[in-house]
Image: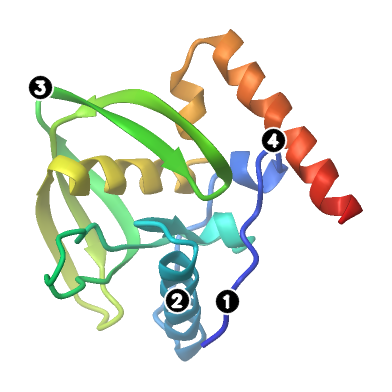
Amino acid sequence: MALLPILIHPDPRLKTPAKPVDEITDDLRRLADDMLQTMYEAPGIGLAAPQVGVMSRLLVMDCVKEEGEPPRPMVLVNPVVTWSSGERTVYEEGCLSIPEQYADVERPAEVDVAWTGLDGERHEERFSGLWATCVQHEIDHLDGRLFIDYLKPLKRQMITRKMVKLKRERARA
């Protein structure tokens, strides 16, 4: 397994819709393992393939945060929201591609998601709470959308300017 570099906003790949995965391969399984390792190391609770420069509809997540609870790493290939609740919830979201920036985002409180697993089988699950927020956030990445796209233009521009400055500082280092 290897740690992958995470793209920092603004980067055109983060705004580009990802392409569907045609088949489950050993390379895809390796990528999923590397993405999980990268996500845990960051640390984060979700990571989409475009965030590591791979333009495929693949995401990983694990929202288990309780001490002593076993991790629940999930790999979703070609995930699709098939139902969302009318009830809404607000979570303070952050993103590994927009480090140290957080904002409240309103989303459906529950969603049903269908996807293909690394076993090649079709899966479906209803997510709620943090899991629902996370899976929607990561599917947004696959569609070329960032959590800051839900914010008012001024706040979005302010965060983007901070990220441009951060990228400049990292380039100099």
For the residues marked 3 and 4, what is the alpha-carbon distance in whole angstroms?
A: 34 Å
Residue in the image at 57% along x and 76% along y: 3
The quadrant in which residue 20 appears is bottom left
Residue contact at pointers 2 and 1, CB within 8 angstroms: yes
Question: How dense is the environment of label 2, judged by Cα within 10 Å: few (below 14), some, or many (20 and up)?
Answer: some
Residue 110 or residue 170, whichever sits in front: 170
Q: Amino acid at mark 3?
A: Gly
Residue at the image point whose x is 57% and y is 83% from the top? 2
As shown in the figure, which amino acid type bears the numbered disc 1? Leu
Amino acid at circle 2: Gln
Residue occupied by mark 3: 86
The quarter holding residue 83 reads top left
Residue under numbered circle 1: 3
Image location (x, y in percent) of residue 72: 20, 71
- For marks 2 and 1, give the CA distance: 6 Å
Task: In the displayed orientation, state which residue is furthest to the front.
Answer: 67
Q: Earlier in the sequence, mark 4 or mark 1?
A: 1
Seen from the viewer's position, the closer of residues 47 and 169 is 169
Q: Three-letter amino acid code at disc 4?
A: Met
Q: Earlier in the sequence, mark 3 or mark 4?
A: 3
Q: Please name which of the two marks, 1 or 3, marks the residue nearer to the observer.
A: 1
Drawn side of residue 173 relative to residue 65, left or right: right
Point out residue 53 in the picture as x, y percentages from the top left corner.
Answer: 64, 60
Name the element at disc 1: loop
> Residue at the location (9% across, 22% down)?
87
In the rendered image, which quarter is residue 167 located in?
A: top right
Q: Tell me: residue 111, above or below residue 149.
A: below
Secondary structure beneath label 3: loop
**Relative height, residue 108 to residue 13 (above, below):** above
Label 3 to label 2: alpha-carbon separation: 35 Å
